């Protein structure tokens, strides 16, 4: 809230129309990950070199995002948005009742989705890599886990998009635009 108060004082009492929430790294990460996952999923067994390159790039992005979750700006840090299951369930109840509070950064459900997507993508990337090694080459169980987690990630992405739409509707706010510009209204 102090950033909002500082902006009001600097402007002579008029609140700013928008404030910076998402830093450039988070925004580039988000859209790059979305595009690369789509590319990897679409190429699958059809264009193996592209699929593998996309997978390695996703792995690198995940490593950077995890690091950024500890050292990045406030809204990018896990400590700012990872909440207990009780808080997440209470928030989801409030969403269903159309009374969920608005969050400047990730809401409790969004924070849970970030963690879930990171975990499913780590498993997908790890099993993808395992399939390229001599030890696990041709191991059907590794391929099945890889495909299951890739499909689970698709389901989570659908849930993520639906959650963004619901939150955008409930709070009269374009969250897609916010992830492009990095800015949201202060209240």
Image (tube, rainbow, N blue to C red):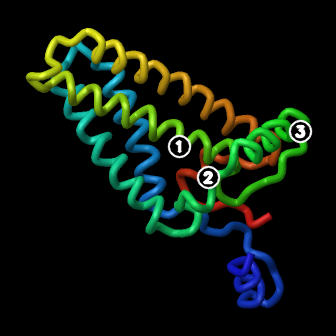
Residue tagged 1: 115
- Look at 57% across and 68% down and name the residue there: 74
Q: Position of residue 4 (x, y in %)?
A: 73, 77
Q: Is residue 78 left or right of residue 142?
A: right
Q: Position of residue 82 (x, y in %)?
A: 61, 52
| Distance of label 2 from label 1 (alpha carbons) | 8 Å
Q: Position of residue 110 (x, y in %)?
A: 64, 44
- Determine the residue located farthest toward the front in the rendered image: 135
13 or 134, which lies in front? 134
- Look at 49% across and 37% down and name the residue there: 117
Q: Secondary structure at mark 1?
A: helix
Residue tagged 2: 82
For marks 3 and 2, the one nearer the N-term is 2
Residue 47 picture quarter: top left
Dots 2 and 1: beta carbons under 8 Å? yes
Residue tagged 3: 98
Q: Nearer the viewer, mark 3 or mark 2?
A: 2
Q: Secondary structure at mark 3?
A: loop
- Quadrant location, the C terminus: bottom right
Whether residue 5 is situated above or below residue 113 in the rendered picture: below
- Look at 53% across and 43% down and name the residue there: 115
- Quadrant location, the N terminus: bottom right
| Distance of label 1 from label 3 (alpha carbons) | 24 Å
């Amino acid at each position: 809230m102090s950033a909002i108060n500082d902006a009001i004082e600097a402007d002579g009492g008029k609140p700013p129309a928008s404030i910076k929430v998402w830093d450039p790294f988070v925004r580039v990460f988000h859209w790059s990950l979305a595009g690369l996952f789509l590319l990897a999923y679409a190429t699958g067994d059809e264009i193996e070199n592209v699929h593998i390159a996309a997978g390695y790039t996703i792995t690198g992005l995940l490593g950077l995002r995890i690091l950024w979750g500890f050292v990045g700006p406030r809204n990018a840090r896990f400590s700012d948005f990872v909440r207990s299951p009780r808080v997440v369930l209470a928030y989801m109840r409030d969403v269903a009742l159309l009374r969920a509070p608005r969050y400047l950064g990730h809401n409790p459900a969004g924070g849970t989705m970030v963690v879930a997507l990171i975990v499913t993508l780590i498993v997908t990337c790890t099993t993808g890599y395992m399939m390229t090694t001599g030890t696990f080459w041709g191991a059907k169980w590794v391929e099945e886990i890889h495909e299951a987690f890739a499909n689970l990630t698709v389901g989570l992405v659908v849930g993520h998009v639906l959650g963004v739409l619901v939150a955008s509707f409930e709070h009269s706010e374009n969250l897609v635009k916010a992830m492009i510009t990095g800015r949201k209204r202060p209240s």
